[in-house]
Image: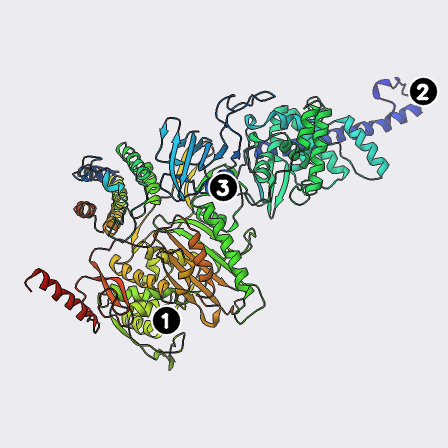
Amino acid sequence: MTDSPRSSPPGTPHGRPAKLIARARRAPKRTAALVLLVLFAAYAAYLTVRVTAAFEGRRWDVPAHVYAAPLELYPGMTLEAVELTAHLEQVGYAESGDPATAQPAPGQPLPGQPLPGQPLPGKFRTAADTVTFTTRAFRHWDALEPSQTLTARFAGGRLAGLDTAEGSVPLARLEPVRLGSLFAAHHEDRILVEPEEIPPLLIAALKAVEDRRFDDHHGLDFLAIGRAAFVNLRAGGIRQGGSTLTQQLVKSYFLDNRRTFRRKFQEAIMAVALELSYDKAEILHAYINEVYLGQQGARAIHGFGLASEYYFAKRLAELDLPEIALLVGLVNGPSYFDPRRHPERALARRNLVLGVLADEGVIEAGAARQAAEEDLRVGDGTRLLSRYQPAFMDLVRHELAADYPVEVLETEGLKIFTSLDPQVQSLAERELAEGLAALEGQPPDDTGAALDGAVVVTRHATGDVLAMVGGRNVEYDGFNRALAARRPAGSLVKPAVYLAALETGRYTLASRIEDEPLTIELGSGRTWSPENFDLTSHGEVPLLRALADSYNQATVRLGMDVGVDAVARLLHGLGLPEVPRAHPSLLLGAVDVSPFEMAAVYGTLANGGFRVPLSAVRSVIDATGEPMARYPLEMTPAADPAAVQQVNAALVQAVLRGTGEIARPLLPAGLVAAGKTGTSSGFRDSWFAGFTNDHVAVVWVGRDDNQPSGLTGATGALRIWAPLVTGLRQSASYAPAPAPGLVGTWLDYETGFATVEGCGDAVLVPLPEGAEPPWLDGCRRGLRRLGERLRDIFGGED
Amino acid sequence: MKTTRVWAALALAVAVSACAPLPPASDENGAAAPPATNAPAPGESGEAAAPATAGAVATLLAQSRSYHASDEYAEAATTLERALRIEPANPWLWLELAKVHVSAGNLPQAEAHARKALSVAGGDTAAREAAEDLLARIAAG
């Protein structure tokens, strides 16, 4: 339009009809222009509202962060120096030279960083049998642990001492490993960093590489757009974007990577709108927390805070030049330049960035050359700060769902402290994967579809879930067998049958029951005749041996005597979520349970009859560090401690000489453990559940298609359980103080008759005071002869 | 409201009386000693002498008592749970947790923890008597 209303000459009504016509034509044009302008303004206003809403929303949308249990260090604990340094590396501490103090930095000192000469938090150094490290301050639920420099001394596989400059300390609680966050449906995960945590070098590098005129433009960089347009015209399509950081931020908010002109247009308006509403520092801060930098399975890595942990296991503020250069290089194509999958591309990209930084004067050319010599240092991803644990996180979400709305968990930046022990978790993952591979290497009688499994490890005294493995593919965020696979428990339920019998007071471990064929009337003319695993009956056997050797006929006979109802109720009391159906087949484990539920039942046994519900979440603090909920240890007496201790004594014998005997050579010499095998009918499920003084571990092995694996509890799950328990170095023998009312008694394992140590097949078990089983032939005489000889010597009265 | 106050008064009364027999470091056995000895008393279970974790547990116990004294029951309990992760079979820690529950007015949990203390006391007569004593007080309301 060349003519404007102002330039049109004044016309006369009669003399110049042509102009009149033109004016008449112009009026609607003007109206149209006005309408267009209004429409555009409305559209721009709409886009402004959308983008500022996104900006404000994202600014505060921080998913809840989930932490593992803190490592408690105390002299006397079982710990090697390498285990401590492994933990320190997992929380992002770096090995440094001596001394671990802040060096005068070449640039400006970062705010919040220690001054030169002060110990540098997050650093450690090792010497012969010592590790010296400076902790970062960490806010736990109950207290803030301040930063301190500690020297840990090691001797003989134990932590021998813990020293500070002021002297030795009895205890130190280290910061926990961050497991990940409860991110939203988009699967975007991020760790929000505050402006003062952002290294100035990162800001300078981002501007130099992505948006040179960031400080001057108003959201759009026309020079860059012009250059990009030229490239695109020559290429005949969109090849290059002239996007500013602001435009990239807008693009990231709306998750749209289509490069259409319409999108570009919208983006441009939104970018300008953002620049009008916020200052440069706010936009840059948002960008640093927003930008997409990688992918781990379903989890999208957003923001430099998380990327720093994901790639380097370090805090953003602790990154050095080559690390910052790599992350800045990733912005352009996180999957194309993925440093773990395409290290050559990533290295070239990083060095290109270093070159740009030198050219732009951000760093010295010498520094760039030196940094370009460095490795990528991203490791293989096995020691990550935020190694995502899908199975455990599943449990965490499940527990939190009862108390917190999803929006709160996904946006309010809560800190969730859990019971997970990262060391136990990786041990459990490794033992399951290696154990299954070994089992598949020697298929017993069935091959084909892959075996899978699940592991749960708990600290029974406090109900802490220390590890949970939902399958052999631990990073797969799918079917969590530990929680969701409910399979027939098989003989794992037998301890409940014996416990119910012992609680009546009519039986002791020495009581003899018949292991002979029997037929149970099921009603409507149906009957059930259980058989033993070895298809042999064993005659009269003591409860001790019937349980340790897992005899079916003896167990069913005992269970029918005390009542299936009583056993069903007891199973619920011990930890099953519901009372199972009281069908006689329950006595041999016809009840579907998950490994997690079994860990609860065995936890109550290990706790001497006190039920402590298993849980993962220990406490919650809000984004500002204020304590919120705490989930305290709660305990319910569920069974008579004396009866439980007798059952447990039989479970110790099961590992020493019964169905779990195969474990004995696999366990460390001298470690006493109690446990039980379980095999469901048709060899579909292979179980082992057992405990030491400190831990309960349950292992399930089977196939997802519920086809036979050909494995028994002993040939399958136990092969994984035994090395797992061996690896639990903090575990001590199961050797409880005798519960009130019990006395240690030597019994002959075969018959349950009283004996003395070394006579017959003697085992020491707790029996109720006053239980006086008949003496084993020949063994009492030995005692009497000894007694008579003593009387001869000392001349005592009878 | 009224019932809460009654419970609180009751709990306080029980707490004061329950804490009396076991003041830190003035018990006839030397109170620092009972919690410091690891639970399966040497010889009792045939186990080797307990690892030297006494310092850590004693420190946490003292910390917990100081929280308890200033009515910070949740902090006191958290601290005891830390100690129990180190020595799960130490009857004195369970007993202390039972007392925290008494102070907090949670008598069912107090009783459960006192029973747990009793069940792990074994040959530790002082611990057994303290647990029985506390159970009797709880039963008496």
Q: Residue A86 got which mark?
A: 3
Q: Residue A311 got which mark?
A: none
Q: Is residue A333 left or right of residue A146?
A: right
Amino acid type indicated by mark 2: Gly
* Tag nearer the camera, 2 or 3: 3
- Name the one closer to the observer, B80 or A268: B80
Q: Residue at x 18, y 40 (%)?
A: B29
For mark 3, does the 10 Å Cα neighbourhood hold few (<14), some (14 to 19), or many (20 or more) residues? some
* Tag nearer the camera, 3 or 1: 3
User: What is the chain identity of the residue bearing mark 1?
Assistant: A
2 and 1 marks on the same chain: yes
Of pointers 2 and 1, the one earlier in the residue sequence = 2
Question: Is residue A66 visible to us here?
Answer: no
> How many marks can you see?
3
Give the residue at mark 1.
A583
- Name the one closer to the observer, B99 or A168: A168
- Answer above or below: position of A298 versus A309: below
User: What is the chain identity of the residue bearing mark 2?
Assistant: A
- Answer above or below: position of A676 versus A278: below
Question: Is residue A184 visible to us here?
Answer: yes
For mark 2, does the 10 Å Cα neighbourhood hold few (<14), some (14 to 19), or many (20 or more) residues? few
Q: Is residue A483 left or right of residue B113?
A: right
Give the residue at mark 2.
A15
Q: Residue A522 location in percent, x, y?
A: 36, 77
Most extreme residue toward the front, as rendered? A793
Amino acid type indicated by mark 3: Ala
